[in-house]
Amino acid sequence: MKTKYIISLSIILYIPVSILCQDKHTVSGYITDVTSGELLINATVYVDQIKSGTVSNTYGYYSLTLDEGSYDITYSYLGYNDISQAIILDKNRVTNIELVVANRVMREVIISANEVNENVEDVGMSRIRIDVKAVKKMPALLGEVDIIKAIQLLPGVATVGEGTSGFYVRGGNADQNLILLDEAPVYNASHLLGFFSVFNADAIKDIQLYKGAIPAEYGGRLSSVLDIKMKEGNSKKFSGIAGIGTVSSRLTLESPIGNIGSFMVSGRRTYADLFLKLSKDPDIKNNRLYFYDLNTKINFRLGEKDRLFFSAYNGRDVFIVDKDSDINWGNQTITLRWNHLYSPILFSNLTLYSSDFDYFLNAEDGADSYEWTSELKDYGVKYNFGAYLNPRSTLKFGMQSIFHKIEPGYARSVGQSNELEINIDNTQSLENALYLAHELEMGQNLKLNYGLRVSSFHDFGPQDVYTYGPDYNVIDTTTYSKGALIKNYYNVEPRIGLQYLLTATTSLKLSYNRTSQYIHQASNSTSASPLDIWFSSSPTVRPQQANQYAFGYFKNIDDDALEFSTEVYYKTFSNTIDFRDHAELLLNDQLEGELRFGVARAYGLELLLRKNSGRLTGWISYTLSKSQKKINEINNGNWYNAKYDKTHDIAIVASYQANDYITFSANWIYSTGSAVTLPTGKYFHLGRSIPIYSARNAERLPAYHRLDLSLTWDKKKKLFGKYDQSFLFSIYNAYYRKNTYSINFKDNPKNSQETIAEKTYLFGIIPAVTYNVKF
C-alpha cells in the first residue's frame, strides 16, 4: 500500500503545476492528405501566441492542451499548403485537418522529408527521415528502386560489398539493426542473395532511420532502428500505380471501403527466369530464379476514438537448378493495430504481430538426395501510450513482449543411401520490456528528452544445454523439459537527449543511450545469405550491450534550403560475439563452441550537407570512422578491425529537374576497401603448399567507387491521354569500375613457388529502363 501512495504522489508531482491551477482545454485531431486520406506523420501544429506547438504522431494524430483563450494555429507539412485557423478554446475541440499538396513552381522543388527547421528544433539526433519520392528518382541496379540502397548513401551507414542489401550502422553488425515493417520485425531484408531488398517502394509511406538517440520505445538491437510504414490506402477514390522494369513488374491498387476505411494491395515479381527458357543450353533453360512480394493493408474507422489497422507482407525467393535442386526462402509478417483515444490528451496503440522467416533446401542426387529446413518465428504484443500534457511536455510509456521460437536446422537424407538425420534443438524464449520517456521544453532554447527501458529475457526448454570447458569442448550436458526455465537476464537501458538552440536556425545536441540485444546471428559471410543462423542468449551466450555517446551541431540556411549537420559518436560494446577461425556454423548442434566473446568499440565523425529546394537538390555525406573488436582467443588478444570497418565513406547524391518533364539524377560513392584476412605467405609440407594468413582482418580490399546515372521522363498524361506516366532510364556503374567482390588465391600451375590472385567482380555497366503509370 505504501508503494502505491508513493507512485501516485510521484505522478501528481510530475504533472506541471499550471495544469492544476487554471482552466485548460485540448484541441486535437488527425492530419491527412486531402486527395488520398493518407495520415501525415510529423506534420507541424504551431500556435503563434505561445511560439510553440507539436507534431502529429505515427498515426497522424496531434493534441495540444492550452489555457482557455483565443489562438491562431497553423498546420503545415512539407510539400503541402499551410492551413491557418483562429479558434476560441473554451472547451475541448476535435479539429481534423486535410492538407492540399502545394502547386510549386520549378525553383521550389523540394526533396527533404523533414519539415522546415525540424532537424534543428527536434531534440532527437542521429535520426533521418527518407523521402520515398526522392528514392524513386535515384539510379538503381537494373532499375529496381531500393530503399536499403538509399539508406547506404547516408552518413554513418556502410555496406560491406557490391550488391548487398545488408547495412552496418556506426560500428555495429548487420544483425544489430532492428528492421520494422508496420511494427513487425523483418529478419532477412534481402532478395536474390542481397542484390535487392524486400521493400517495394510503391507500398511504402514513411521511412525513418535511428542511428543513435534511439527512443525508449525501441529495443532488442544495439545499433539502429529502421522503422518503415506502409501506405494505408486511398480513402477518397480508387487509384493505382503500375510499373514494368528490366527485371520486375509491379502493381499497386488503393481504394476506399465505403466511408469507414480503405485498403492497399501491392505486388511485385521478377521475371528473369522467363528469359532463361529461351536459351538453347538445357543446363540454363531448366533453371529458375525469381522473387515476389505482396503487401496488404486495410484500415477501418470505428468512430471518433477508434481505428483498426491490419497489414501483412509475404515475400519469397525461389532458385531452382535444372529441376534437381532448389532453395527458397522468405518472410511473412502480420500486424493488427488498434488506436484508441482514452481522452484528447491520451493516445494509445495496441499492436499484435507475427513474423516468420524460413528457408528450404532440396537436392535430388539419386541416393544422396537430402532436404534441409530452418525457421525463425516471432509473436509479439506492444501497448504504447502517448500523453500530450501540454505543448512543452509529452509523456510516452508502454510495454512489449515477444515470444521467439528458433528452429536452427533440420536435415535428412531422402535418397536410398545411408539414412542421415540432423536435428538441431529448437529454442524458445520470451523477451519483455517496460519503458517510460518524457520530452520537455525547458524554456525557449533548451529541450530535454529522457527515458528508461527495463528489459528481460527468459530462455525455456525443451532443450539440451551444453557446458563448455576452457578449450570450448563440451564437458557436461543438462536436459531441460518443456517449459522449464533455463536462464533469466535483466537489463536497465537509460536514454537521454539534450538540445540547445543557439539561434533560430542553429542548435547543439547531446545524447546517450544504452541498448541490449538478446538474439544474435551467426554468419561467416560478408554478404547476406538466407543460410545465416539466428540463435538466442543462453547460459553460455550473454546478451550483448552497447553504450553510445553522441554530440552534434545542426545548421539550416535560407528556410531549410541548405541543411548542414555534423555528429561525432563513441560506442562501446560488451559481450560482443565473433567466431573462431574456420568456424562450422551450419547444422552444428554445438554452435556455441564456435563462438568467442569479448568487447568492441567504434567511433567516428559524420558530415551531411543537404540541398532541399531548387532545381538542383541532393546531399553530400562523409563518414570518418573506426570499428574494432578485442577477444582473447582471436588475434592474440589484441584489437583487430571488424569486417565492416571502413575509414572513409563518401556519397554524393544529386537530382536536377530541367523542366516539368525531365529530371537527371546521379549517385557517386567512394569507400575504403573492406577489412579482410588474406594469405601473406606460404610454406611447404609433404609436397603441399600451405598458406600463412595475416592477422584477423588486417588487410584491405581495393577502394570501392562507382557512378550511377538516371533520367526520369514524366509524360504527364500524353502517352495514352488519361494517366500520368513516366520512364526511368538508368545506368549502373557508368564508368565500368571493376570493384572487387572477393579475391581468391591459388598456386600457379606452371610454378608451384608462385601464388596467383584472382579477383572476382560482379557488375560492369548495366543499363535499365522502367515504365510507370499512375491512375
Image (cartoon, rainbow, N blue to C red):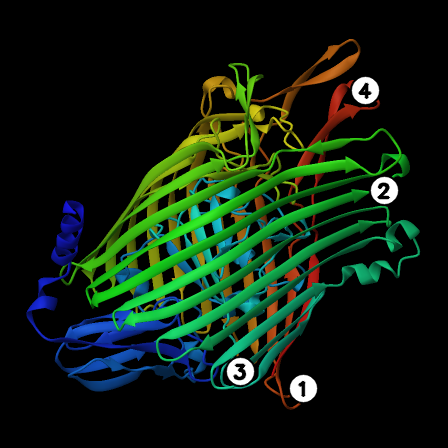
| Of the two numbered discs 2 and 4 in the rendering, the one whose residue sits closer to the viewer | 2
Q: Which amino acid, mark 2? A: Glu
Q: Are marks 4 and 3 in contact (CB under 8 Å)?
A: no
| Of the two numbered discs 3 and 2 in the rendering, the one whose residue sits closer to the viewer | 3
The residue indicated by pointer 2 is 364
| Of the two numbered discs 4 and 1 in the rendering, the one whose residue sits closer to the viewer | 1
- First in residue order: circle 4 vs circle 1: 1
Inter-mark Cα distance, 4 to 3: 74 Å
Q: Position of residue 59 (x, y in %)?
A: 39, 69
The residue indicated by pointer 3 is 257
The residue indicated by pointer 4 is 751
Inter-mark Cα distance, 1 to 2: 50 Å
Q: Is residue 314 left or right of residue 659?
A: right
- The residue at the point 12 percent across, 67 percent down is 19
Q: Residues within 10 Å of mark 1 (few under 14, many from 20)?
A: few
Q: Is residue 672 left or right of residue 399?
A: right
